[in-house]
Image (cartoon, rainbow, N blue to C red):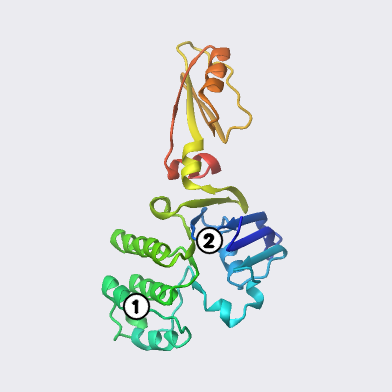
Amino acid sequence: MNSIIDIHDVSHCFVGGQNVLNNVSLQIPPGSIYGLLGRNGAGKTTCIRLLVGLLKPQEGSVTLLQEDPLTWKSSVSQRVGYMGERGFLPGNITGQRLISWTKKLYPQWDEALEKRLVEIFRLNLLSRISSLSLGQKKQLAFLLAVAFRPAVLILDEPAANLDVMARRQFLEEIAALARESETTVLFSSHILSDVERVADRVGILSKGSLLVDEPLDDLKAGIRQVRFFWDRPEPPPVNIPSAYRHREGRGETLVTLRFTDAETMHQIAEEAGCSWEARGLNLEDLFVEITGEK
């Protein structure tokens, strides 16, 4: 696979020896919109900081656009847009001044896109940045990260703490950038409905390990929750070792697993002397079932 983003066998730990990432490998092909999922502390931000050269991997390697982020030349950095989780911006200048300074760094700056985003977000560029709301600051940071139409866009929780309408605008612009400029996008989020709306590929991190890395449609098509049920007092001996999650209730056993074929499920149910049915899961349910986390 021709990868724009390549994380290979990366492990990383912080003071105290607790591993934040455990032997993580991740490859993202050109033109993808990749959603990196996980609870707070799962390792999402660490992955992103490694990708943009803010951290050095203790084990393994990281490349972006086939280059090591720690030794990027300006020609590479001008092709990468980045918006951190906190979206830090200087507070003592106006948004207009900050945009003027930033666009000088990027010969390919798209003023039409800049104007469109200012109008869509209703940005007040004449006010000092310190006086803007959290949402307006995030929207301004997003504009700065995308107005030069980067080849790669990396966003860490870009829509956190925003209202529904503002989040929808972010998602629409991410999709438009990928469509219009063939930009490869990686964005982390714990808002799973946002990821499901725009991502074509997802990774699920849990406790520093990458449990899933595949196209979203394949994930949703391939994993099912199977309900085995019966009408007698004692539960049947249903055991599938490879299941992501297995739990028993009154009169039923619920198993979440990679669904291969109906014939296999029918055979398991027949041997246990029970009936069965399967259902698909949305991304939020898949996340809970795969990680065992809510």
Label 2: element kind: loop
Residue 92 visible in the snapshot = no
Q: In this view, does 238 lie above or below 57?
A: above
For mark 1, what is the residue? 114
Identify the secondary structure beneath mark 1.
helix
In this rendering, would 150 be left or right of 173?
right
In front: 63, or 164?
A: 63
Relative image position of residue 167 (x, y in whole percent): 34, 61
Quick one: 151 or 34, which is closer to the camera?
A: 151
Provide residue 195's location: percent of width, then percent of height. Answer: 43, 53
Residue visible at 64% across and 67% down in the picture = 63
**What residue is rendered at 52% in x and 18% in y?**
266
Task: Give the percent coordinates (x, y) of residue 209.
Answer: 63, 51
Q: Which mark is residue 263?
A: none
* Placement of 198 over or under 150, stated as above or below: above
Residue 189 visible in the shown view: yes
Q: Which of 234 and 151 is in front in this view?
A: 151
Q: Using the numbered discs, state the Cα–Cα distance from disc 2 to disc 1 in whole angstroms.
A: 24 Å
Determine crowd level at label 1: few under 14, some 14-19, many 20+ residues with C-alpha closer than 10 A.
Answer: some
> Based on the displayed image, in which of its 4 quarters is residue 163 positioned?
bottom left
Q: In this view, does 160 lie above or below 115?
A: above
**How many C-alpha atoms fall within 10 Å of the one at disc 2: few (<14), some, or many (≥20)?**
some
Residue 155 in the image: state x and y as whole percent.
48, 66
* Residue 30: image tag: 2
- What amino acid type is highlighted by mark number 2? Pro
Relative to 273, residue 146 above or below: below
